[in-house]
Image: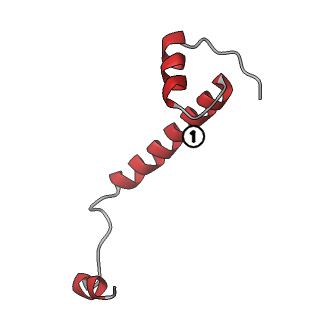
Amino acid sequence: MRTTLNLNDEAVEAAMAVSAGRTRTDVINEALREYARRKRLKGLLDLRGKAPWEGDLDALRARS
């Protein structure tokens, strides 16, 4: 999908310096995927302590 964006040149160059992507498009797509991944993980962290735990932690540790 083509989209016109006004991007901060310094931010894009900094991202390109640390990214494996070779083009601006690669770097921006990688950044968007990483942003979405982090938001999903934050959503999981927000559930911390809200789900009841039923189990035997010692038995789980002994399974190895």
Amino acid on which disc 1 is placed: Arg
The answer to whether 49 appears left or right of 32 in the picture is left
Q: Which residue is mark 1?
A: 33
Point out the residue furthest to the right here: 1
Crowdedness near tag 1: few (<14), some (14–19) or many (≥20) residues, C-alpha within 10 Å:
few
Asked where in the image residue 50 lies, by quadrant, the reply is bottom left
Identify the residue at image location x=51%, y=24%: 17
In the image, residue 61 sits, relative to residue 13, either above or below, namely below
The answer to whether 45 appears left or right of 13 in the picture is left
In the image, residue 33 sits, relative to residue 41, either above or below, namely above
Name the residue nearer the viewer: 55 or 33: 33
Task: Give the x, y percent position of residue 51.
Answer: 32, 67
Identify the residue at image location x=34%, y=53%: 45
Identify the residue at image location x=35%, y=57%: 47
Task: Give the x, y percent position of residue 12.
Answer: 54, 18
Under tag 1, what secondary structure?
A: helix
Asked where in the image residue 9 lies, by quadrant, the reply is top right
Quarter that holds the N terminus:
top right
Point out the residue furthest to the left here: 58
Q: How many marks?
A: 1
Q: How is the image coloured?
A: secondary structure
In the image, residue 36 sits, relative to residue 7, either above or below, namely below
In the image, residue 62 sits, relative to residue 51, either above or below, namely below
Name the residue nearer the viewer: 39 or 32: 32
Quarter that holds the C terminus:
bottom left
Task: Give the x, y percent position of residue 37.
Answer: 50, 45
Name the residue nearer the viewer: 63 or 7: 63
